[in-house]
Image (cartoon, rainbow, N blue to C red):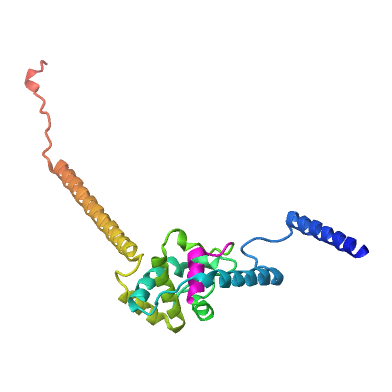
Protein backbone atom coordinates (compact mmCIF):
# COMPACT_ATOMS: atom_id res chain seq x y z
CA UNK A 1 0.00 0.00 0.00
CA UNK A 2 2.95 2.35 0.59
CA UNK A 3 4.21 2.07 -2.99
CA UNK A 4 1.21 3.77 -4.66
CA UNK A 5 1.39 6.58 -2.10
CA UNK A 6 5.10 7.06 -2.71
CA UNK A 7 4.53 7.15 -6.47
CA UNK A 8 1.66 9.62 -6.04
CA UNK A 9 3.76 11.93 -3.84
CA UNK A 10 6.67 11.70 -6.28
CA UNK A 11 4.41 12.64 -9.22
CA UNK A 12 2.98 15.61 -7.33
CA UNK A 13 6.46 16.83 -6.43
CA UNK A 14 7.60 16.43 -10.04
CA UNK A 15 4.60 18.39 -11.36
CA UNK A 16 5.15 21.19 -8.83
CA UNK A 17 8.86 21.32 -9.73
CA UNK A 18 8.14 21.49 -13.47
CA UNK A 19 5.49 24.19 -13.07
CA UNK A 20 7.80 26.13 -10.77
CA UNK A 21 10.62 25.93 -13.32
CA UNK A 22 8.30 27.07 -16.12
CA UNK A 23 7.24 30.17 -14.19
CA UNK A 24 10.72 30.89 -12.85
CA UNK A 25 11.97 32.30 -16.16
CA UNK A 26 15.33 30.57 -15.74
CA UNK A 27 15.16 28.85 -19.13
CA UNK A 28 16.62 31.06 -21.86
CA UNK A 29 14.19 31.21 -24.80
CA UNK A 30 16.22 33.68 -26.87
CA UNK A 31 16.95 32.70 -30.46
CA UNK A 32 20.62 33.57 -29.90
CA UNK A 33 21.06 30.66 -27.47
CA UNK A 34 20.78 27.03 -28.61
CA UNK A 35 18.65 24.48 -26.79
CA UNK A 36 20.48 22.30 -24.32
CA UNK A 37 21.18 18.69 -25.31
CA UNK A 38 18.11 17.19 -23.63
CA UNK A 39 15.63 19.69 -25.11
CA UNK A 40 17.26 19.45 -28.54
CA UNK A 41 17.02 15.66 -28.49
CA UNK A 42 13.41 15.75 -27.30
CA UNK A 43 12.24 18.21 -29.97
CA UNK A 44 14.20 16.73 -32.89
CA UNK A 45 13.18 13.15 -32.05
CA UNK A 46 9.52 14.14 -31.68
CA UNK A 47 9.60 16.10 -34.95
CA UNK A 48 11.19 13.24 -36.86
CA UNK A 49 8.67 10.70 -35.56
CA UNK A 50 5.76 13.05 -36.32
CA UNK A 51 6.95 13.69 -39.90
CA UNK A 52 7.36 9.97 -40.60
CA UNK A 53 3.93 9.17 -39.20
CA UNK A 54 1.98 11.90 -41.00
CA UNK A 55 3.76 11.53 -44.34
CA UNK A 56 2.74 7.88 -44.73
CA UNK A 57 -0.56 8.81 -46.38
CA UNK A 58 0.99 11.15 -48.98
CA UNK A 59 0.73 9.92 -52.56
CA UNK A 60 3.85 10.85 -54.52
CA UNK A 61 3.38 11.75 -58.21
CA UNK A 62 6.05 11.16 -60.83
CA UNK A 63 8.86 13.62 -60.11
CA UNK A 64 11.21 12.73 -62.95
CA UNK A 65 9.89 15.32 -65.42
CA UNK A 66 12.59 17.93 -66.07
CA UNK A 67 9.92 20.64 -66.47
CA UNK A 68 8.86 19.96 -62.89
CA UNK A 69 12.37 20.65 -61.61
CA UNK A 70 12.59 23.79 -63.76
CA UNK A 71 9.38 25.06 -62.21
CA UNK A 72 10.73 24.07 -58.81
CA UNK A 73 14.02 25.95 -59.03
CA UNK A 74 12.30 29.33 -59.49
CA UNK A 75 9.95 28.61 -56.60
CA UNK A 76 12.79 27.29 -54.43
CA UNK A 77 14.82 30.42 -55.15
CA UNK A 78 11.89 32.61 -54.03
CA UNK A 79 10.55 30.52 -51.14
CA UNK A 80 13.45 28.54 -49.64
CA UNK A 81 16.85 30.02 -50.45
CA UNK A 82 16.59 32.86 -47.93
CA UNK A 83 16.50 30.49 -44.93
CA UNK A 84 18.07 27.26 -46.21
CA UNK A 85 20.60 28.65 -48.65
CA UNK A 86 21.26 27.07 -52.03
CA UNK A 87 24.27 25.70 -53.93
CA UNK A 88 26.75 28.58 -53.94
CA UNK A 89 24.51 30.74 -51.68
CA UNK A 90 24.63 31.02 -47.89
CA UNK A 91 21.36 31.65 -46.02
CA UNK A 92 20.31 35.30 -45.96
CA UNK A 93 19.93 37.43 -42.83
CA UNK A 94 16.65 35.86 -41.72
CA UNK A 95 18.07 32.35 -42.11
CA UNK A 96 21.20 33.21 -40.15
CA UNK A 97 19.05 34.30 -37.20
CA UNK A 98 16.91 31.17 -36.95
CA UNK A 99 17.23 28.84 -33.95
CA UNK A 100 17.25 25.97 -34.61
CA UNK A 101 18.98 26.81 -37.91
CA UNK A 102 17.17 25.80 -41.09
CA UNK A 103 18.70 22.52 -42.31
CA UNK A 104 20.77 22.12 -45.45
CA UNK A 105 18.14 20.74 -47.83
CA UNK A 106 20.76 18.79 -49.80
CA UNK A 107 21.27 16.74 -46.62
CA UNK A 108 17.52 16.54 -45.99
CA UNK A 109 16.96 15.27 -49.54
CA UNK A 110 19.31 12.36 -48.89
CA UNK A 111 17.70 11.67 -45.50
CA UNK A 112 13.98 12.05 -46.19
CA UNK A 113 11.52 10.55 -48.63
CA UNK A 114 9.71 12.72 -51.21
CA UNK A 115 6.50 12.25 -49.20
CA UNK A 116 8.20 13.57 -46.05
CA UNK A 117 9.71 16.53 -47.91
CA UNK A 118 6.28 17.36 -49.30
CA UNK A 119 4.56 17.06 -45.92
CA UNK A 120 7.07 19.38 -44.22
CA UNK A 121 6.94 21.93 -47.06
CA UNK A 122 3.15 21.94 -47.02
CA UNK A 123 2.55 21.88 -43.26
CA UNK A 124 5.67 23.45 -41.77
CA UNK A 125 7.09 22.69 -38.33
CA UNK A 126 6.05 24.59 -35.22
CA UNK A 127 8.56 26.76 -33.35
CA UNK A 128 11.29 26.35 -35.96
CA UNK A 129 10.55 29.20 -38.37
CA UNK A 130 9.48 26.71 -41.07
CA UNK A 131 6.17 28.05 -42.46
CA UNK A 132 3.28 25.99 -43.78
CA UNK A 133 3.49 26.82 -47.49
CA UNK A 134 0.23 24.93 -47.98
CA UNK A 135 -1.58 27.96 -46.56
CA UNK A 136 -0.74 29.92 -49.72
CA UNK A 137 0.25 27.26 -52.27
CA UNK A 138 -1.70 24.28 -53.55
CA UNK A 139 -0.19 20.81 -53.94
CA UNK A 140 0.59 21.38 -57.62
CA UNK A 141 2.78 24.34 -56.63
CA UNK A 142 4.60 22.41 -53.88
CA UNK A 143 5.56 19.22 -55.74
CA UNK A 144 7.91 21.08 -58.14
CA UNK A 145 9.85 22.35 -55.12
CA UNK A 146 10.17 18.78 -53.86
CA UNK A 147 11.39 17.70 -57.31
CA UNK A 148 14.08 20.39 -57.17
CA UNK A 149 15.10 19.56 -53.59
CA UNK A 150 15.73 15.97 -54.66
CA UNK A 151 18.29 17.27 -57.17
CA UNK A 152 20.21 19.34 -54.61
CA UNK A 153 22.67 16.60 -53.52
CA UNK A 154 24.01 16.52 -57.10
CA UNK A 155 23.96 20.28 -57.77
CA UNK A 156 26.92 22.64 -57.38
CA UNK A 157 26.76 26.42 -57.69
CA UNK A 158 27.25 26.37 -61.47
CA UNK A 159 24.59 23.69 -61.91
CA UNK A 160 22.12 25.65 -59.80
CA UNK A 161 22.69 28.82 -61.84
CA UNK A 162 22.34 26.87 -65.08
CA UNK A 163 18.98 25.51 -63.90
CA UNK A 164 17.82 29.02 -63.04
CA UNK A 165 18.84 30.23 -66.50
CA UNK A 166 16.94 27.37 -68.18
CA UNK A 167 13.89 27.91 -65.95
CA UNK A 168 12.91 31.36 -67.20
CA UNK A 169 9.11 31.48 -67.37
CA UNK A 170 8.62 28.26 -65.37
CA UNK A 171 7.04 27.94 -61.95
CA UNK A 172 4.58 29.61 -59.63
CA UNK A 173 6.97 32.50 -58.88
CA UNK A 174 8.28 33.06 -62.42
CA UNK A 175 5.78 35.88 -63.10
CA UNK A 176 6.72 37.56 -59.82
CA UNK A 177 10.38 37.56 -60.85
CA UNK A 178 9.45 39.07 -64.21
CA UNK A 179 7.29 41.71 -62.51
CA UNK A 180 10.19 42.60 -60.23
CA UNK A 181 12.40 43.06 -63.29
CA UNK A 182 9.81 45.31 -64.96
CA UNK A 183 9.39 47.28 -61.75
CA UNK A 184 13.14 47.91 -61.56
CA UNK A 185 13.23 48.91 -65.23
CA UNK A 186 10.27 51.27 -64.75
CA UNK A 187 11.92 52.81 -61.71
CA UNK A 188 15.15 53.35 -63.65
CA UNK A 189 13.20 54.86 -66.57
CA UNK A 190 11.29 57.16 -64.22
CA UNK A 191 14.55 58.18 -62.58
CA UNK A 192 16.12 58.96 -65.96
CA UNK A 193 13.04 60.97 -66.97
CA UNK A 194 13.21 62.91 -63.74
CA UNK A 195 16.90 63.66 -64.28
CA UNK A 196 16.15 64.76 -67.85
CA UNK A 197 13.31 67.04 -66.69
CA UNK A 198 15.57 68.51 -64.02
CA UNK A 199 18.29 69.21 -66.56
CA UNK A 200 15.77 70.85 -68.90
CA UNK A 201 14.37 72.93 -66.03
CA UNK A 202 17.87 74.05 -65.03
CA UNK A 203 18.61 74.89 -68.68
CA UNK A 204 15.47 76.99 -69.03
CA UNK A 205 16.19 78.82 -65.80
CA UNK A 206 19.76 79.47 -66.93
CA UNK A 207 18.55 80.81 -70.30
CA UNK A 208 16.01 83.08 -68.63
CA UNK A 209 18.69 84.35 -66.29
CA UNK A 210 21.00 85.14 -69.21
CA UNK A 211 18.18 86.91 -71.01
CA UNK A 212 17.55 89.06 -67.98
CA UNK A 213 21.25 89.87 -67.65
CA UNK A 214 21.65 90.71 -71.35
CA UNK A 215 18.47 92.79 -71.63
CA UNK A 216 19.08 96.46 -72.32
CA UNK A 217 19.02 98.67 -69.28
CA UNK A 218 16.51 101.53 -69.55
CA UNK A 219 17.61 104.59 -67.70
CA UNK A 220 15.36 107.49 -67.07
CA UNK A 221 16.80 110.67 -68.52
CA UNK A 222 16.34 113.75 -66.40
CA UNK A 223 14.95 116.69 -68.30
CA UNK A 224 16.70 119.73 -66.95
CA UNK A 225 14.77 122.05 -69.22
CA UNK A 226 11.74 122.00 -67.01
CA UNK A 227 13.62 123.13 -63.96
CA UNK A 228 13.57 126.72 -63.00
CA UNK A 229 16.73 128.21 -61.64
In the displayed structure, does residue 181 sit left or right of residue 145?
left
Question: Is 13 situated left or right of 101 in this image?
Answer: right
**Where in the figure is residue 74, as x and y percent of width and height?**
37, 70
| Image quadrant assignment for residue 45 | bottom right
Q: Is residue 21 left or right of residue 199?
A: right
Of residues 191 and 50, the one nearer the viewer is 50
In this view of the protein, which residue sits in the foreground, 140 or 42?
140
* Residue 83 visible somewhere in the drawing: no
Q: Residue at x 51, y 81 (%)?
A: 110
Question: Percent from the top left, x then y, of residue 46?
Answer: 64, 69
On whether residue 86 falls in the magenta region, the answer is no
Compared to residue 218, the image places residue 125 above or below, namely: below
- At x 29%, y 69%, the residue is 169
- Relative to 221, say whether 102 is above or below: below
Q: Residue furthest top?
A: 228
The residue sitting at the right extreme is 2
Q: Main secondary structure of the magenta part?
A: helix
Front-most of residues 152 and 65: 65
Q: Is residue 206 visible?
A: yes
Q: Position of residue 52 (x, y in %)?
A: 57, 73
Q: Residue at the bottom extreme?
A: 154
- Measuring from the top left, give residue 13's x and y in whole percent: 84, 59
Q: Residue at x 19, y 51 (%)?
A: 200
Residue 180's image quarter? bottom left
- Quarter containing the C terminus: top left
Q: Is 125 part of what is drawn in magenta?
A: yes
Give the extent of the magenta segment.
114-126
Q: Quadrant of the N terminus?
A: bottom right
Judged from this view, the residue extending furthest toward the left is: 225
What residue lies at 16% left-to-right and 41% top-to-bottom?
A: 212
In-front residue for pair 220/179? 179
Position of 67 with respect to 224 (left or right) is: right
Amino acid sequence: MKTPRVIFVFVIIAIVAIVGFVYSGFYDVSASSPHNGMVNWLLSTMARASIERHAKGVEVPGLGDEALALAGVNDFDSMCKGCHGAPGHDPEAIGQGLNPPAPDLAVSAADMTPAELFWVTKNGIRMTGMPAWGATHDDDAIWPVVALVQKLPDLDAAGYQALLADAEGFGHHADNAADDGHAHASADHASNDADHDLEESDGHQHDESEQRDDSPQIHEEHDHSTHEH
